[in-house]
Amino acid sequence: MRLSQYFLPVTKDVPSDAAIVSHQLMLRAGMVRQNGAGIYSWLPLGFKVLKKIEQIVREEMDRAGAVEMLMPTLQQADLWRESGRYDDYGEEMLRITDRGGRDMLYGPTNEEMITDVFRGYVKSYKQLPLNLYHQQWKFRDEVRPRFGVMRGREFLMKDAYSFDLTEAAARVSYQKMFAAYLNTFDRLGVTAIPMQADPGPIGGDLSHEFLVLAESGESAVFCDSEVLDVPAPGLDFDFGDETALAAEMDKRTKFYAATDEKHDAAAYADVPDGRKTEARGIEVGHIFYFGTKYSEPMGAGVQDSDGNVVPIHGGSYGIGVSRLVGAIIEACHDENGIVWPASVSPFDVGLISMRPKDEACAAGCDAAYDALTAAGFETLYDETDDRAGAKFGRMDLIGLPFQIIIGPKALEKGVVELKIRKTGEREELALDAAINRMRALA
Amino acid sequence: MRLSQYFLPVTKDVPSDAAIVSHQLMLRAGMVRQNGAGIYSWLPLGFKVLKKIEQIVREEMDRAGAVEMLMPTLQQADLWRESGRYDDYGEEMLRITDRGGRDMLYGPTNEEMITDVFRGYVKSYKQLPLNLYHQQWKFRDEVRPRFGVMRGREFLMKDAYSFDLTEAAARVSYQKMFAAYLNTFDRLGVTAIPMQADPGPIGGDLSHEFLVLAESGESAVFCDSEVLDVPAPGLDFDFGDETALAAEMDKRTKFYAATDEKHDAAAYADVPDGRKTEARGIEVGHIFYFGTKYSEPMGAGVQDSDGNVVPIHGGSYGIGVSRLVGAIIEACHDENGIVWPASVSPFDVGLISMRPKDEACAAGCDAAYDALTAAGFETLYDETDDRAGAKFGRMDLIGLPFQIIIGPKALEKGVVELKIRKTGEREELALDAAINRMRALA
């Protein structure tokens, strides 16, 4: 993409209410524009990151056997009256009346609707297990939206819903999501720790939050450092192996890890001294087994092998997709701007032409652009007339993993300058060698 | 995808209010489920088609130089007060009040919001031309939603917005979208005819609707048959060639083509007799030059080369993405069900195992599934215990371009049965030969 044909409105104007670094950087890098309290437009650069996260989440949900669909943003109030949540939900639910006087709402979550979809079609235990997910915009009318996309009102969430005949089977579905989440966050380039969360209406141990560690995180986190070193299950993990599924959960939950809300000082005291770790974290996922909470009142039952109709056991599994854009920036930035993990970077490499008006330099840069593109690198090509300092600052700010800088002198020598954004390391080498270097590092 | 692990709730129950064939077929094929008046969930099969259309639209917008972003679904009423449309829009606008008492609305279109984004950043003619687009859910509170996703209330639209310094430059932007639309609909496997539409506030010839021809179309269409034979510009078309851009428009608009609303019987009488064509059509796109309608009241101006601030000339360009799912089915079906164009088919091929409980047959089908997948065919593998007739009927109903049918006898002979959905043609041949055949036909 040639920068002159792109829309990348970087800016130095950041409103004073942008209190955290990810919010400031997203505004400065031209990733988002606020359209109202807690409501944002995703400008082209931000949109690309959002789509990359969405795609990684999709691939890992699919790998774990979940099936993608899409529910609408607006829902009928009557559905929520069936579960009893219409009155309970409070002011965070955005209630709407249509021209026909019908009570509707902008979905803050989809347990009721997916239960309605399920009961419309599934009648036999033979059709289970089933896990359906979507990635759709939600709305929660926060009284004080803040932190940019981290606590917006209109936000993109991946929510999956599992349906099983028994609690034991639901546990397996839960463990699949647990393992899939570990792979997802690993691919997104962040360390996310699962932590026991409030168990909900029926107790038990099947409720975990996943927190990304970041200095500016909203929650204090206390953990045994060993939990940070357990590797993700990996993309060749067998989701059909129930022993391995249980082991993935056990090998993390055996270590102490809790947010301040759930912190147990006595249990933490038992963590060996050299391993006590206090950090901060941002919640980016939450998984939850809720049994028959929705299936009983809403009549979502299936026939079991004896012919009896029994309510299904359900779970829900959320990932804050738009929130993750902010969370990743919180975890991945330096004093010059964002430092994207390669997997979610909006472009793979930034190409800077030092003298676009110099014919030889322009031709050399055009050729490099074609070569990078042909090599499979999605390239943002800065061929603008801006001064060098502005180009360097902008490219550092938007945080692509690599920069290729080409000026007339380097061209004469037959080299380009490769800059590694994360380390600041610079090296002069032939373009082919730079491409090989980037491939090796990617 | 193994059918036993998928969610494909085909059904024979179709409510009597499903009046048109695409609505009936989408319900029968388990593509959508109604959640409220004009509001649908996209079940996995329907979701895949929607995503394929969205991706083709994206690729052709990008090819024409438009830049993708994403605006939110909810908007501030104040923005619409600036353009004067908040009061004018009428009851189709879904008006919402949030917990803070602010007037909001669910966006039915985005001219105001994109103009606000534009004026926030763009100050100089040097930053033009600019064309920004998004694909986002919209809401129009239709008094009588009907025809399934063809006239829903919550619907997915691609809307692009161009910004130019002059009317002449805006004409070029318009022609780019005109050419891009021809390629888009061609890739979607349908014939779409551009027809002069109401010119809007400032007159002129820059307003066209694109109609897909389908027997059950909502509008009567009168045209010169020659317009049907003009080929699409093609994917190697040079969007930088202004002469070619103008020619693409001219070579169509020189032939008579109009819906009943705009029909001019006298002009139609001049069409040579053998070429007079009366058909029916469905509007799937609408492009529109509106000049300074929004930029003047909203203060979206740029400095021209003389340093004067002038309001920009704008256009908007819509494609009904969710509506297209229905429109394509209206154009592409037979008495047995849907017949997808290959480009938007939810899977490339359906593999039917005739005897899943027969060990040799199951092994042969598993091997065929692996071979098809390795050959790059996205395969829906029916390894269920359903009876053969049900399997055949279901596979025909969902309309994948190819079926591979494997039973014990064929396996012994070393062949499979290849069925071409569109023609009904069946052939026994080796799997490799079937793969080559499908490649040649795809």
Image (cartoon, coloured by chain):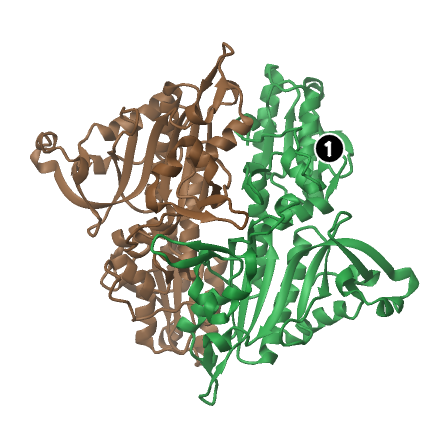
Chain colours: A brown, B green
| Viewer-side residue, A336 vs A419 | A336
Query: Taking B167 as reference, is A232 above or below it?
Result: above
The x, y position of residue A432, in whole percent, is: 42, 60
Residue at 32% over, 70% down = A392
For this orientation, the residue located farthest to the right is B273
| x and y percentages locating residue A23 in the rendered image | 29, 59
B6 to B291, vertically: above or below: above
Residue A159 left/right relative to A267 = right
Element at badge 1?
strand
- How crowded pointer 1 is (Cα within 10 Å; few <14, some 14-19, many 20+) is rated as many
Residue furthest out toward the bottom? B306
Check disc 1 and give the amino acid type.
Lys
Foreground residue, B99 or A441? Answer: B99
Q: Is residue A2 visible?
A: no
| A303 or A21: nearer the viewer | A303
- Which residue position holds label 1? B419
Q: Does A29 appear above or below B416?
A: below
Q: How many marks?
A: 1
Which residue is pictured at 40% across the width and 40% down the height?
A: A109
The location of residue B124, given as percent across then percent down, is 44, 80
In screen coordinates, is A248 left or right of A377? Answer: left
Residue B227: % across, % down: 79, 63
Outermost residue, front direction?
Answer: A101
Residue A90 in view, yes or no = yes
Along the viewing direction, whichever of B57 and A388 lies nearer the viewer: B57
The residue located at (39%, 55%) in the rendering is A436
Q: Residue at x 68, y 66 (%)?
A: B208
Residue B368: quarter of image: top right
What subunit carries mark 1? B
Side of B417 relative to A80 (left or right): right
